Amino acid sequence: MYSEPTKIPTLKNVRKIQCNEGTMAIKQSGELFVWGPISKDKSLIIPTKVQSLSDKIVDCSIGKFSYAAIDEKQMVWVWGDNKQAQLGLSDYTARQTPYPLLSLNDK
């Protein structure tokens, strides 16, 4: 257990942070970063930009190995573990990269 905060020098201008098994952060620029355990078998040891999200991210949420983000166009993106259909995609298939949650987005 850590008793003192540790500065992450590579991650500045953060406007929102979410923690669960892993961590997500949105920078002022709208870029989204993740780190920590991202699946049962994989961890990212440094904050890593989610490259596949091209629009600015305005909000995010993190579950146990599952992630959600909303971009500036109000598109909802989900990815990660899906063993209990927690991504809302009508299946149990895990997604390694963000996938649009079309049931919540305007069609």
Image (cartoon, rainbow, N blue to C red):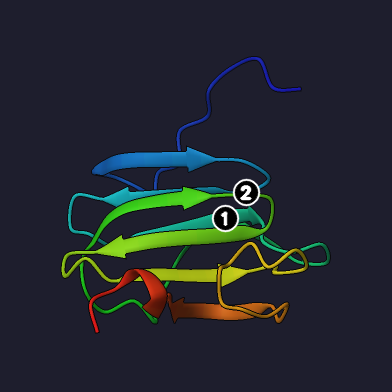
The foreground one among 41 and 4 is 41
Determine which quarter of the picture holds residue 72.
bottom left
Residue 51 visible in image:
no
In this rendering, would 50 be left or right of 58? right
Callout 1, which amino acid? Trp
Image height of 15 relative to 96, above or below: above
Q: Percent from the top left, x then y, of residue 95?
A: 62, 80
Give the CA distance from mark 1 to mark 2.
Answer: 6 Å
Q: Which mark is residue 99?
A: none
Q: Which residue is mark 1?
A: 35
The earlier-in-sequence mark between 1 and 2 is 2
SS for tag 2?
loop
Mark 1 touches mark 2? (CB < 8 Å): yes
Q: Residue at x 49, y 69 (%)?
A: 78
Q: Which residue is mark 2?
A: 22
The foreground one among 86 and 52 is 86
Determine which quarter of the picture holds residue 104.
bottom left
Quadrant of the rendering where the N terminus is positioned: top right
Callout 2, which amino acid? Gly
How busy is the neighbourhood of tag 2: few (under 14 within 10 Å), some, or many (20 plus)?
many
Q: Residue at x 73, y 77 (%)?
A: 92
Image height of 57 relative to 54, above or below: above
Residue farthest toward the right in the current orientation of the protein = 41
In this rendering, would 34 be left or right of 12? right
Residue farthest toward the top in the current orientation of the protein = 3
